[in-house]
Image (cartoon, rainbow, N blue to C red):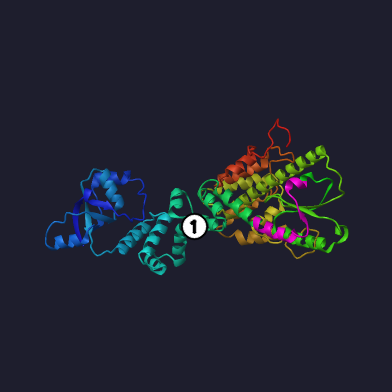
Amino acid sequence: MRIQNIPLDRLYPHPDNPRKNLGDLSELSNSIKAQGVLQNLTVVPANIEKYQREVGGKKAYTGDYKIIIGHRRHAAANMAGRSDVPCEITVDMDEKTQIATMMLENMQRNQLTLIEEAQGFQLLLDLGSSFNDISAMTGMSETTVRRRVKIIKTFGAEAIERVQGRPITFDDYEQLYKIKDPDTQAKLLEKIGTVNWAWEIKGALSHQASETIKAEMIKVIAGIAIKVTQDEMRRAPKRNTLSFYNFSDKEFEEICSFAKEIRDGVGSYAGVDVFYSVGDRYGGIVIYTLEDAAVDVAEKNKAAAKKAEMAEKYEHMKGLFKQAYEMRVSFVKKINPTAENRDIVKFFAAEILMCGYRTCEDVYCDIFDIKGGLRPHWSDSKKETQVEAASRILGENCNTSNVYAFLLKSAYVNIEDPDASCVNMNLKHYQNNLLEKTYKWIAKLGYVMSDEEKALVYGTHPLYVKDGEPDQ
């Protein structure tokens, strides 16, 4: 290895350098102006054979060099007006070793993004390295290396480039892998790392789950009942609605039981035509019979159809508010307050606990992961009462570093409402002060409302009927 000053115009960034963005160079450039380049760059001759021939024959090598370590110093020296920089010249690096050296150097300095690492690993794999080789070289587990490479293989470098620079984590990509539909996955990738990401992925996963259950529920009822469209269902004369099922695991079991009754012709179902209509993820399945075959009256039909449509939209909006509740609870459950925001937690707890808000059992169980609910005071079941659960949770948390997280959750269950919304049955918006207060406090702790949450809470969502407009 030789050290010499090399003119900047003979030094070139390595084309396979994993780090694509060198960041702000102004501070480094000013340092180089004042003190020069204090650490040698590591370079390789662009034409190693020519270099060995000319240096071996004691001639000056006139070719160019590729930078292995020191890309930022090279660029900053150029900004500082330097003509040359000190370099260590090495000739014993093959292409794979060059890439591995650049990878390690950047990783040790925490200068690579997750995608840059993934692209670097893929390059090493293309050159013949195994996952085990890369794991041994970088000190990362083989699983971690595979996860990074999977990002590139799943979504493609071009799509990943478009989202570079956003605050994206491994968990975000793991969530995206769960989406089975390629088109939906591609659309969500454009949202990853944005303020709406958590809302969008939560909604997509919920929709995917409901679609899976929907397909199973339709299998159960198809062949037993007659399928009609939503519009036909709304216009049905003297419709006698037997049941309504949302797309959930619990209601899947119920529809199986209901289908058996229809199949067996139990009671009023004997010899009667049964109809079913399938709505969207919030609309569910409506099952009904007709009281008689009366002729449809246009005006009556129109009013019934309008009422059914409003009910569907209302259920849709209630579903969106439910999703917003789940996101708020998920956020609060994960918070472990730092020294910087513990004062916020104390003021939040003081305001909420001293104002006497009612504790909601559902929120209590969701926040503290209490399965199966609590025992009412009049029951003799073996479940915990709320007081017993509180004592247990206090003992588990109060002597640990999580005491502030416990304080936050304890106060939060007094302000949160799983049925909180801002829409009435006529699809009109109303101000929900408690819900706005909830958002105000969790925002201070880092929660970011999605655009759709803002529209729901502040009345700008397109499903709302505006003041002055007739009810839909």
Crowding at dot 1, Cα within 10 Å, few <14 / some 14-19 / many 20+, comes out as few
Q: In this rendering, does residue 387 appear at all?
A: no
Q: Is residue 81 above or below residue 184?
A: above
Q: Nearer the viewer, residue 118 or 140?
A: 118
Residue 381 placement: quadrant: bottom right
Q: Position of residue 175 (x, y in %)?
A: 55, 56
Q: Residue at x 56, y 50 (%)?
A: 198
Q: Which residue is mark 1?
A: 170
Q: Residue at x 83, y 55 (%)?
A: 273
Q: Position of residue 69 (x, y in %)?
A: 29, 56
Q: Residue at x 70, y 54 (%)?
A: 362
Residue at the image point whose x is 52% and y is 55% from the top: 172
The magenta region covers: 211-233
For mark 1, give the secondary structure: helix
Image quarter in which the C terminus is found: top right
Front-most of residues 411 and 242: 242
Q: Is 173 one of the magenta-colored residues?
A: no
Residue 266 quadrant:
bottom right
The amino acid type found where label 1 is placed reads: Phe
Residue occupying the far top of the picture: 468
